[in-house]
Image (cartoon, rainbow, N blue to C red):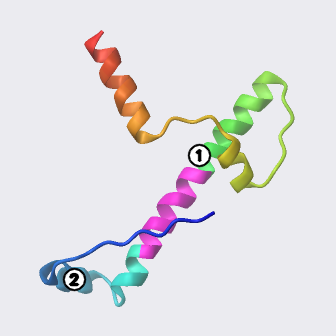
Amino acid sequence: MSKSYTITLSDAQDKALGVEAASQQEWIENVVFERCRHSIELIVANEIQRKLAAGETISGTKEEIVLAADIESAVERTARILAEQQG
């Protein structure tokens, strides 16, 4: 399964981004893909350490490890932190 996201830039935003990038579309895609790559590496590293500590078998591709990982989303993490702060 994959997801598609669409953003809309104002004319001013598009022009401003053009100062930084030869192709706004490619720049946006590169930023998002790099952010995802970084997060995947972090999740995989954390899962490997968790599995090693628990004596569990490590198997699967990086994508399979990420999809199987029990991780908090940013929304879940924020809600948990806010609840902890409210005590």
Does the magenta portion include 20? Answer: no
Residue under label 2:
14
Q: Earlier in the sequence, mark 1 or mark 2?
A: 2
> Residue 79 appears at what percent x and percent y?
35, 28
Secondary element under disc 1, as helix, strand or loop, is: helix
Look at label 1 and name its amino acid: Leu
Q: Residues within 10 Å of mark 1 (few under 14, many from 20)?
A: few
Image quadrant holding the N terminus, namely bottom right
86 lies above or below 65: above
9 lies above or below 33: below
Residue under label 1:
42
> Residue 18 appears at what percent x and percent y?
25, 86
Question: Which region shows up in magenta?
Answer: 29-40
Q: Is residue 48 left or right of residue 14?
A: right
Splitting the image into 4 quarters, where does residue 82 fall?
Answer: top left
57 lies above or below 44: above
Q: Residue pushed farthest bottom?
A: 22
Q: Nearer the viewer, residue 9 or 39?
A: 9
The residues bearing labels 1 and 2 have C-alpha atoms spaced at a distance of 32 Å
Q: Which callout, 1 or 2, points to the residue nearer the camera?
A: 2
Q: Is residue 43 left or right of residue 12?
A: right
